[in-house]
Amino acid sequence: MRIAVDAMGGDNAPQAIVEGIMLAQKEYPTIEFQLYGKETEIKKYVTNDTNIKIIHTDEKITSDDEPVRAIRRKKTASMVLAAKAVKDGEADAIFSAGNTGALLTAGLFIIGRIKNVERPGLMTTMPVLGNPDGGFDFIDMGANADNKPEHILQYAILASYYAKNVRHINNPTVGLLNNGSEATKGSELTKATYELLAAEKEINFIGNVEARDLLTGAADVIVTDGFTGNAVLKSTEGTALALMGVLKESILSAGLKGKIGALLLKDSLKKMKNELDYSSHGGAVLFGLKAPVIKTHGSTGPEAVKYTIRQIHTMLESHVIEDLVQHFEKESQE
Amino acid sequence: MRIAVDAMGGDNAPQAIVEGIMLAQKEYPTIEFQLYGKETEIKKYVTNDTNIKIIHTDEKITSDDEPVRAIRRKKTASMVLAAKAVKDGEADAIFSAGNTGALLTAGLFIIGRIKNVERPGLMTTMPVLGNPDGGFDFIDMGANADNKPEHILQYAILASYYAKNVRHINNPTVGLLNNGSEATKGSELTKATYELLAAEKEINFIGNVEARDLLTGAADVIVTDGFTGNAVLKSTEGTALALMGVLKESILSAGLKGKIGALLLKDSLKKMKNELDYSSHGGAVLFGLKAPVIKTHGSTGPEAVKYTIRQIHTMLESHVIEDLVQHFEKESQE
């Protein structure tokens, strides 16, 4: 198993990335990690070089780079070289905490789509609040701005395989994000999508799910178009952050009483914060490509990098992508 | 000023509604309140009958009724009679805490649209967290499942007038909910909408706003299509509720420590909860109709009813609808 790592992507790169790889190395000593980036910088954080290959390059893609142009022009950027390694069969998966748009572009144009998958989607396993073992796979979180019903049907298939193979959920339930729970509800897009999902025998479609029920674990897989997915994800994050901010400020301004109260409730407050942290499930998968292409937050720390390597390891071990290739191959023959 | 009240709409009707009207009556003794519903039930809660008219009817629309059918068939339902009073010029506005879809239908088909307004939208003043005086007008929250760019432009005009006339904001800023802040971002719908908004001289368009920045007060008015608005609103509510639930449960399970901590942080926790309660701004307006049509949550209490009457009073006093009629009249002559 060989994982190509964009060591220069993210706010704390290469330190956080390489430190995370060192944590992952302890768990998976047989994985070969290919670290793409500035050798002298990377070496500072390599504490054990077993199965570590450093591929030096001075060029990197920044968060301000325009994605398509960056992938075209920065031909020796760490992210581009890592993607090429996957394309050329020298690595089995790519991981980056860098520019999301650029990684999507590199995934689509360098690594390429699974045959018959029209529009790969961005998928994350989100938390179910109040159930630390819970989670649901949410796709498309924003790889596309406009989706057709056929794309969303493919997301349902992709994510069902993921839930089954990677998260070991038997016969995972699939919900369609919609503006009402009744079957007749929706926009033109969701109504047409509903019909496709209901007719597809290989998924366990349970109907519409409203945005307010997402975090309660309404289904194992939730599918939506990329525009809505992006809006829902960001408003969920924004609401949580804003609320925590209000609480924090209110505690700070409450003086000694606030201090003691916060100390006594430390565990409870921490628990609330932890519930929102879904990095233990790994990063976001650009799903529908010929290999795992995984993105984590730019602000990711070593621990989250380790979780993401664990996720990639499970994806490769479970042959989820090979199974999907077969599925979509078969579909074209029918 | 005469307000038609659907006294039978909502989970706690008629008690919560009539008690709320009694609170509002103290503040606005000159408003005539027309209470539609079961007279014997309503009378129980009328403590002062000055300017109170009760129009008896046995029929009412329930939350389970299919909206269009209910409006067509239940011709003497309290909501239908209240809407007819507005249509016939016997009342200046209608208020209900009942079936949202039915109220939208009654508003559209009985009261009717302002000339040249194509698709009235549902609008609420949402809170800006950390700023108790702040708020932004969010439209369309879900009156429509599919919107065209022209509709969203009209929402921007409608809500700008509201922010100016009713919330007394000078030259209110307008943001377009989108999947990125750059001008070039978006779906086909938001890109086309962006161009219309940027070209409209009567609004103060400041560009795209991402869903994660909504509650931070990014703009005085945020416009979006009804499907996305519904999803964002519900995920905001869902996230807040789920988070509060996690915190509450975590405190309860922390035993004595949790109890004392919660006691010390009582004010801070209450503040967090209050920040989310935007009922002080009133209810949701079905905006673009010939008269104020206002909806509050089915679970609304007397206090929220009072705030909503205050909102209707300001709307009527500020002549916001007359100004809008003029605006859209003028537009058709150009």
Image: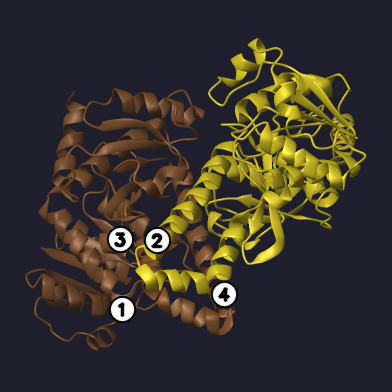
Chain colours: A yellow, B brown
Which is more N-terminal, label 1 or label 3?
Answer: 1
- Residue B283 shows which numbered tag? 3
Discs 2 and 3 share one subunit:
yes
Q: Are marks 3 and 1 on the same chain?
A: yes
In front of the other: label 4 or label 2? 4
x then y, percent, for residue A207? 66, 55
Q: Going 23% across and 66% down the picture, which residue do you hit? A: B307
Asked which quadrant contains residue A96, the reply is top right
Q: Are marks 3 and 4 in contact (CB under 8 Å)?
A: no
Eyeballing the image, is A315 above or below B235? above
* Left or right of residue A195, residue B293 in this image: left
Measured in 3D between alpha carbons, the distance from the residue under mark 3 to the one under mark 1, in whole angstroms, is 15 Å
Q: Amino acid at mark 2?
A: Thr
The quarter of the displayed image where residue B325 is located: top left
Q: Amino acid at mark 1?
A: Ala
Residue named by callout 1: B16
- Camera-near label (2 vs 3) is 3
In-image side of B152 versus B243 (left or right): left
Amino acid on which the number 3 mark rests in the picture: Gly
Q: Mark 2, mark 1: which one is toward the viewer?
A: 1
Query: Is residue A237 in sight in this rendering?
Result: yes
For disc 4, the marked residue is B249
Query: Residue pushed farthest right?
Result: A30
* Kind of residue indicated by mark 4: Glu
Residue B185's place in the image compared with B30, above or below, is above
Residue A216 occupies quadrant: bottom right
Q: Is residue A34 above or below residue B136?
A: above
